[in-house]
Amino acid sequence: MEPKIIVDYLNEVGEGPLWHPYEKRLYWVDITGGKMFWYEPSTNTHDQFFEGKTIGGFTIQKDGSFLLFLENGSIASLKNNTMEYLVSEILEERGMRFNDVVTDPEGRVFAGTMHQNSDLALNGEKLGNLYRIDKDMSINKVLQGTKIPNGMGFSLDHKTMYYTDSGNKSIYSFDYDKNTGNISNQKSLITVPDGEGLPDGMTVDSNGDIWSASAGGYSLNQYSSSGVQKQSIKFPASMVSSLTFGGDNLDDMFITTIGGENKKDNGSGAGALFHLNLGVKGNPEFLSEILT
């Protein structure tokens, strides 16, 4: 089955798709425009519903609202289209922004930062950090020296956390303690060869396989939990950025892309939201439970 464009808002940096289990809608962002969108498969309708500052990522809270992870280490709650800052900034993260986030099995959030100039970030001139935000809103730095922190996920037994650093072209594994949220014993699991793009957003399916978007590689790649590549699906967009599973059976894949401002160079599907159904089921994304 070929990837199919279902919505095209010409996103400059389409990212972070999440399936909302209560609303039965797919949500995603355009990072640089600070825009948020939704798509409802049952009615084939869609809209942009929010625009603000740079949104690096978001989570869906247990009450159905959103947590937004923004620039300068700021974190905000978005309820009924009204944004309220919970963290105005993290001093160390001035000039930086959050890039990708994930909710863990216990409702905590892991969120990585990078420099707002992606070239400086990619070259390692300006390094960021990976944070864990606990349910009581305490913020803990768990990894330093990140280039472009990206897709994260968890093994089916919740004993391993996966973490992508696009700047290193690598997906890593950590031992993960669900009770404490601590990560340890970092290992390199997957390294993408030169010329095949950068690993970007990711998720884990119901078989435990890792699906990783390839920014610059025109593809979405499937790996086993041991890091062996199983298949590569090509897209008419150079920068495939992230994906999630959704739909009633969690077998619909929704994939975001980058570069809608220049389709000539980035591909005819650049900046669009794609749909794909390969008969593979995903897992429900965890809902954050951060005190607001």
Image: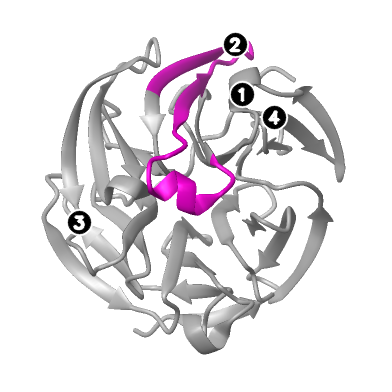
Instruction: Tell whether position 129 is magenta.
Output: yes
| Element type at mark 1 | loop
Q: Mark 2 vs mark 3: which is more N-terminal?
A: 2
Q: Mark 4: few, some, or many residues within 10 Å (few <14, many ≥20)? A: many
Q: Mark 1 vs mark 2: which is more N-terminal?
A: 2
**Mark in the foreground, 1 or 2:** 2
Between the C-alphas of marks 4 and 1, the distance is: 14 Å
Mark 2 — residue? 138
Q: Amino acid at mark 1?
A: Glu
Q: Name the residue nearer the viewer: 40 or 112.
A: 112
Residue 289: numbered disc = 1
**Mark in the foreground, 1 or 3:** 3
Which portion, as a residue range, is magenta? 115-143
Q: Amino acid at mark 3?
A: Tyr
Query: In this rendering, is residue 86 above or below 232?
Result: above
Residue 223: numbered disc = 3
- Residue at image point 65% right, 33% down: 61
Residue 75: numbered disc = 4
| Element type at mark 3 | strand
Disc 1, disc 2: CB below 8 Å? Answer: no
